């Protein structure tokens, strides 16, 4: 029951007389029941209070928090709340083939061999089968974009062959057709002489990433993985993203820079080897390094970017995944779930395990990032729960981590579709999951650092803090190393240093639009002020669009509907202005959904608007932005045909 105002109800003697006593008693009983339920929490009464031109909903106070500090309270959203459960379903694991793998990599006695499983030949064909293999190599990337590969001539293989190259493609045929194709990746002895820069003990770093996974969605879709991580790893409960998509969040973690700072020395128009990645520092300190990412079309450094001219790490698996995607694929929700006879995710987990086990005796740094089962559907991770759990709990892997700090994490939560229009979806998008494993040896050698780390799990944290933690680990292993602290967040620190209890989003370079510390109350979407804010947001979108050369291909947006609006608690600034933050979701014509945070300054009946941070686009816009190439512009574009574009260009 919702009340728009408070009322008192009078009962006179005429009501009691004339046979109305029974009805009066019934009303009293109902009132008593209502008061009892409200008092015990069985019925949460939500009260509407009019504030100026908006209607604010008071949220019940019995809220649990992930962290609850003096300046930051992040709600612990129920992963199965009413507003989100309608979008949740279970996805089944589907094997990519009913047959076993005809070829496999065997590593024994210091040798690496490609072998044919002869016992399976009859399953593939009743006729004679012959096989050959090719090395998968990169081309000259001085001029070309880092998305092409070439194959050496196919060399026959009988039962097995020693490998001298890390990536190979296998083709097996009978007299009529190819019956089996696959690609394999393996680690060989490091291709360079690793410098011995210090005799001090170094701790390895393993990063395992799952794109677009919030804390809540991990719990919802991958309960077995979630349980294992909770039992064996430690979660940063207040980990908040700092940017919209993968690139700013992952670059903050890998470089310590914001996107704006990166543009001064890390242009997206040239190869990205010079972007000051932290793996360069680890490599220079004697570490063997690796980087891998599946779903090549949207990989972090290749989507709307040119990739790398030279391999950025000792083991660079991009050619391997490019080759895997030339095999027959099976798509699920537009992602390459199966690449040939194996899932893309299991390929990733296998090479991550191979890298860690192969280099367990030497310091190593590896980043293994998965998009293929999480990027485009909020439920598909449920199909890979068993596979990820199997990887994390694998005996050979676990026994190789005695000197390794492990991060299993994401960049942000799910960013698109109906689920994002909910309050839970808003919160989840900004709160990626992150779990960290600290080996026993580190805990014993550095008890104070470990104690600080435990304290920090209850504080507001960011990818910039993780970058600074890497710097701390580099200093531990090399006393001559000079730490390069995060430029994107001067106030951020290593997770092994105690973080301030009173941290705010402003302190740690999180724009208000991404900040989950303060929350908001829902307000009337039809109010005059909210409508003006919606028009302001759409005007800002059109202004952003008009800064690009390809703007003529994109329509101008107009407000169609305010889908939802939220408002923070107000305060009075030093200029005697009432200040409020509004989070507004706007539906436009042509069809798009935008979300933005707007600061409203009110004084003497006059309101001033200021956009805070980025503008999010919540609808899936790939299909309606094919007319342009610029990846940034796509976010603010709707292609509406060549004729309209030409007319718009002419009238300028």
Image: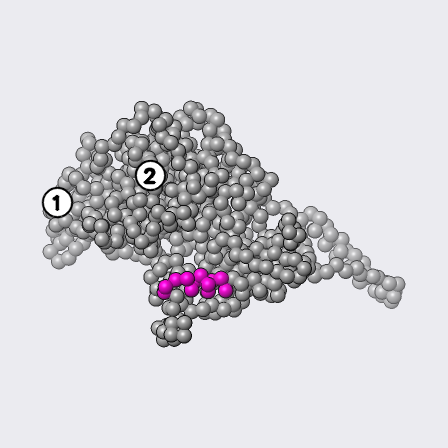
- Residue closest to the eye, 619 or 118: 619
Figure check: 161 above or below 89: above
Rendering coords of residue 15 (x, y %): 85, 65
Most frequent secondary structure within the magenta stretch: helix
Q: In which quarter of the image is residue 314?
A: top left
Q: Is mark 1 on a helix, strand or loop?
A: strand
Q: Please, which colouring scheme is shown?
A: one colour
Left or right: 331, with 607 as reference point: left
Residue neighbourhood size for the residue with mark 2, other residues' Cα within 10 Å, grouped as few (<14), some (14–19), many (≥20): many
Which residues are the magenta region? Answer: 538-550
The residue that appears at 46% across and 42% down in the rendered structure is 489
- Residue closest to the eye, 28 or 322: 322
Q: Which of marks 2 and 1 is in front?
A: 2
Rendering coords of residue 583 (x, y %): 55, 56
The quarter of the picture where the N terminus appears is bottom right
Rendering coords of residue 629 (x, y %): 33, 61
Q: Which of the marked residues, 2 or 1, is nearer the chain's N terminus?
A: 1
The residue that appears at 40% across and 26% down in the rendered structure is 441
Residues marked 2 and 1 touching at CB (< 8 Å): no
The quarter of the picture where the C terminus appears is bottom left
Left or right: 153, with 608 as reference point: left
Q: Which mark is residue 72?
A: none
Q: Can residue 638 be seen in this view?
A: yes
Figure check: 14 above or below 194: below
- Residue closest to the eye, 623 or 501: 501
Rendering coords of residue 276 (x, y %): 34, 42
Q: Residue 157 carries which label?
A: 1
* Residue denoted by label 2: 279
Figure check: 460 above or below 204: below
């Amino acid at each position: 029951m919702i009340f728009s105002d408070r009322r008192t109800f009078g009962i006179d003697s005429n009501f009691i007389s004339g046979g109305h006593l029974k009805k009066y008693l019934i009303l009293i009983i109902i009132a008593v029941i209502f008061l009892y339920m409200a008092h015990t929490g069985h019925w949460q009464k939500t009260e509407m209070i009019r504030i100026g031109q908006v209607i604010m909903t008071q949220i019940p106070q019995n809220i649990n928090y992930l962290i609850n500090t003096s300046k930051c309270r992040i709600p612990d959203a129920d992963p199965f709340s009413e507003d989100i459960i309608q979008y949740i379903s279970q996805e089944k694991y589907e094997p990519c083939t009913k047959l076993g793998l005809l070829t496999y990599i065997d590593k024994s006695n210091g040798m690496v061999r490609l072998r044919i499983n002869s016992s399976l030949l009859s399953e593939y064909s009743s006729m004679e089968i012959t096989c050959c293999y090719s090395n998968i190599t990169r081309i000259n990337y001085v001029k070309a974009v880092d998305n092409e590969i070439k194959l050496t001539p196919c060399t026959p293989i009988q039962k097995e062959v020693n490998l001298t190259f890390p990536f190979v493609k296998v083709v097996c045929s009978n007299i009529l057709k190819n019956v089996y194709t696959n690609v394999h990746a393996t680690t060989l002895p490091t291709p360079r002489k690793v410098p011995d820069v210090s005799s001090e003990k170094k701790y390895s770093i393993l990063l395992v990433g799952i794109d677009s996974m919030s804390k809540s969605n991990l719990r919802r879709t991958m309960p077995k993985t979630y349980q294992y991580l909770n039992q064996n790893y430690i979660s940063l409960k207040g980990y908040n993203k700092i940017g919209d998509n993968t690139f700013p969040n992952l670059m903050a973690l890998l470089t310590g820079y914001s996107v704006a700072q990166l543009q001064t020395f890390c242009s997206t128009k040239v190869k990205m080897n010079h972007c000051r990645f932290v793996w360069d520092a680890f490599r220079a300190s004697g570490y063997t390094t690796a980087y891998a990412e599946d779903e090549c079309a949207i990989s972090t450094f290749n989507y709307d970017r040119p990739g790398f001219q030279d391999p950025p790490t000792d083991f660079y698996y991009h050619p391997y995944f490019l080759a895997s995607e030339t095999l027959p694929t099976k798509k699920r929700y537009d992602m390459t779930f199966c690449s040939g006879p194996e899932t893309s995710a299991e390929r990733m987990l296998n090479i991550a395990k191979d890298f860690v086990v192969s280099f367990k005796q030497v310091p190593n740094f590896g980043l293994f990032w998965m998009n293929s089962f999480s990027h485009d559907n909020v439920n598909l991770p449920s199909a890979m729960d068993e596979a990820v759990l199997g990887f994390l709990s694998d005996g050979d892997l676990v026994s190789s981590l005695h000197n390794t700090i492990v991060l299993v994490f994401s960049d942000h939560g799910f960013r698109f579709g109906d689920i994002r229009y909910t309050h839970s979806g808003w919160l989840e998008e900004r709160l990626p999951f992150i779990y960290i494993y600290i080996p026993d040896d580190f805990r014993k050698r550095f008890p104070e650092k470990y104690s600080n780390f435990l304290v920090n799990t209850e504080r507001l944290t960011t990818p910039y803090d993780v970058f600074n933690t890497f710097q701390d680990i580099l200093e531990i292993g090399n006393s001559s190393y000079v730490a390069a602290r995060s430029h994107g967040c001067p106030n951020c620190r290593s997770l092994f240093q105690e973080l301030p209890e009173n941290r705010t989003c402003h302190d740690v370079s999180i724009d208000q639009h991404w900040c989950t510390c303060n929350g908001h109350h829902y307000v009337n979407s039809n109010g005059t002020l909210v409508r003006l804010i919606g028009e302001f947001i759409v005007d800002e979108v059109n202004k952003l669009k008009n800064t690009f050369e390809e703007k003529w291909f994109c329509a101008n947006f107009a407000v169609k509907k305010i889908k939802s609006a939220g408002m923070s608690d107000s305060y009075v600034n030093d200029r005697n202005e009432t200040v409020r933050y509004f989070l507004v979701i706007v539906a436009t014509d042509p069809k798009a959904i935008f979300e933005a945070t707007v600061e409203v300054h009110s004084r003497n009946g006059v309101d001033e608007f200021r956009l805070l941070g980025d503008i999010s686009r919540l609808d899936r816009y790939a299909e309606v932005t094919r007319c342009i190439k610029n990846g940034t512009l796509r976010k603010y574009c709707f292609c509406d045909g060549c004729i309209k574009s030409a007319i718009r260009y002419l009238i300028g």
